[in-house]
Image: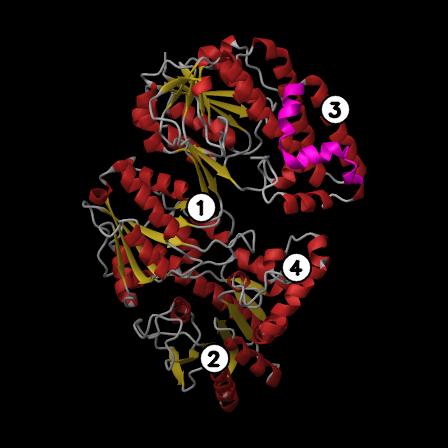
Amino acid sequence: MKRIFVVSWFYPPLNSSEGLVTARLLAHTKYPCDVFTQAASARWSYGLTAELPTADHVRRIEAKADTPTAFAEEAFRYFQAHRDAYSLVMTRSMPPECHAAGLAIKRAFPEIPWLASFGDPIKDNPYRHLDESLFSRWSVLSLKNRNASPGFCLSPRRAAHELLWLLRHRAALRERVMLSDLEDETIRRADRVLVNNRSELRFLLPDEALRDKAVLLRHSYDPALYEDLPRQRTGGKTRFVFTGTLDAQRSACPLLEAIAELKADTGDLEERAEFLFFGTMAERDLAAIVRLGLTALVCYSPPISYADSLRQLSAADWAVHIDADLSEVWHENVFFAAKLSDYFGAHVPVFAIGMPSGDVTRCLERAGMVTVGFSVGEIKQALYEILYLGRRAVPDWDWIASEFDVQRTAERLDQVITEVVPNGI
Amino acid sequence: MKLLTVVVPVYNTARYLPRCLRSVLVPEALERLELILINDGSTDSSVSILLRAERRYPQTVRVIDKENGGHGSAINEGLRAASGRYLRVLDSDDWFDTPAFLRYLDALEDCEEDLIVTPYTQEYAAADQRVFVRYDRLTDGKSCSLGELELNGNMPYVPLAAATWNTELLRRCGLRLSEHCSYVDMQYILFPIPWVKRVRFIDACVYRYSIGRAEQSMAPGRFLKNLPQHERVLRSLVDFYAAQRDRLDTAARAYIERVISLMVYTHTDFLCRKLPGRFAAFRRCRAFDAYLKHTAPSVYRQTDTYAELRLGRRLGFLHLLIGRSALPRLMRLIHPHPQKDA
């Protein structure tokens, strides 16, 4: 039997959501895989702190390259040298250069089926459109201006501002063109495009004709990883745990301000609740904890190992999920944080702060979790209901398992593989 | 008799209803509260949510199911059914801050005034945006006459989110809002004013007004589409003022004139800037202005203090036929804040 060649910049022991999702998925597929990955660069990760049980049918091949571009080139060369060992290629972004490797392979070997998995959209990633060093606010191509009036679009003043911006940000323009070509070509040439939520599917493939090659493969959890972990505590303060990354767009400030207001209103919040953050936190959020006088309620710890993060989640009363507010550039959330699958696996109710529209919100509501918007008043009210009125989430664990259990996801992947490799791996 | 009736008009807000109801139906409030939920012909699952609440809290919740007639018709129905000493309206896509609501109920026990004023917040859907309307010049628990009521410059009247009425006063004044029409909350807050003698301020920020969604009537796109309704409500207020003017005391007259002036400014501003068609904007502005001058000359004079409106009137609104942006640009040069003269 041949093998599947998987190109993934992130993979354990590198601790990152994308790598962990890949590792869990491949461990449960029935097909043997070689994962071409790297450990030279811990950039965009929490370091080499993710240990997962090894799967006998998954081999790890470590690249020497420490930049995504060099990594993609090395992946292509490796595949070229070992072509006969493989009957399928799967590339997993982010970073997008993984798909560059897939594209190179597909151009050189058009007969090889290729699955391109998009962790996030690439060329029009809403995060990029929020960043004015990457997209000018005067640009008609910016998602911020997607509903702009004809007057704005045709305005000479706007055009002049955009031209000046382009002259000053040539590198950003070149990168934008490169990413656009990469995504378009990947979608065109890949045999299947794997996405992790329906909003991403609509966003990535607005052309309905291309949706035939789309496959929805959710971020999944492995129940076996939680078997030996302590269950939720009983008694004591209500513990809210966040694990992951917070930044300028995905900020804890609305939550912190809500906690501060609730504390001022009730006077005994410190006896009822505690909020633990593990991971990375923006300076603004850290400053807010001090500014709002929340040091007795809110505790921040730097990134911990993956195993420790699961342990913390299993012992929590609520897992906190915070999404970015992308409403300035898109009407719905097109992302589905892989970390949510860890939360589901821990069987802990989720308190989610995010946009009102998007597949992630729909899933969380369907799953019976508590979802609120970004308004401080709404967050505060929900916390009050939980802490003082006994409001509970009513999780539908059966539905969650049917959508996010890695066994189901792996079966779906195996089905897709059977479709694209009809003669078998 | 229950202390407070809260009327909740509901139309296709199944998504927001649970939040609204949870914030009000708390154990400490149930005995003092009468919650009247008016289903105004919803076509989504709102009515099942309402009936579930009624089954769960039969001593507190009453559901009235009616054909669609608009926000005003639902409030009319709620007022007819209300039995609480005080009454306030809670829109079903908004909610109460429960701790503040409980403090407010405690303070309401000792009230006998006609109108109770409370601060509120405008809660935007996007992060980092929130407006507190605090009424900083008012003292918590203090009772005063309408003339002594010192409201903030940026919110110089008491909107629906801030108002609690004595139910009997609303019945005495024969409050009846227009039906099949948006913006009737302005009728709700103005029609009872001639009967108001005493006002009290309770410093509990109860009402959380959810704002910034495209489907709301104040969203710019919807406002333009609903401009005829806005004008219908505005004319009803002007006619009301004209009919009541001679019996109004100084404070009530000043209050009503102030609110109508603000509405007139918003209305003509939209007509001038946003209404498609230069000739249509010109015709409508002139027609409304002539009506206002004839029906309520004192309000007309008061709105002359808005510099852009004043200049537009001097020009006979002819500038709208030439180019709409010319006058606003000229005004921005002359007055950096071209709304009201200082």
Q: Which mark is residue A68?
A: 2
Q: Could you tell me how far apart the alpha carbons at marks 2 and 1 are, in whole angstroms?
A: 36 Å
Tell how many labels.
Answer: 4
Provide the residue designation for mark 4.
A208
- Are the residues flagged by discs 2 and 4 from a single subunit? yes
Magenta stretch: give its range: B297-321
Q: Which mark is residue B290?
A: 3
- Are the residues flagged by discs 3 and 4 from a single subunit? no
Chain under disc 2? A
- SS state under label 2: helix
- SS state under label 4: helix
Disc 4 or 1, which lies upstream in sequence? 4
Residue type (three-letter) at the residue carrying disc 3: Ala
Taking the magenta stretch, the answer to whether it contains residue B316 is yes
Q: Are marks 4 and 1 in contact (CB under 8 Å)?
A: no
Dot 2 surroundings within 10 Å: few (below 14), some, or many (20 or more)? some
Provide the residue designation for mark 1.
A373
- Are the residues flagged by discs 3 and 1 from a single subunit? no
Q: How is the image coloured?
A: secondary structure
**Residue B239 location, x and y as percent?**
65, 16
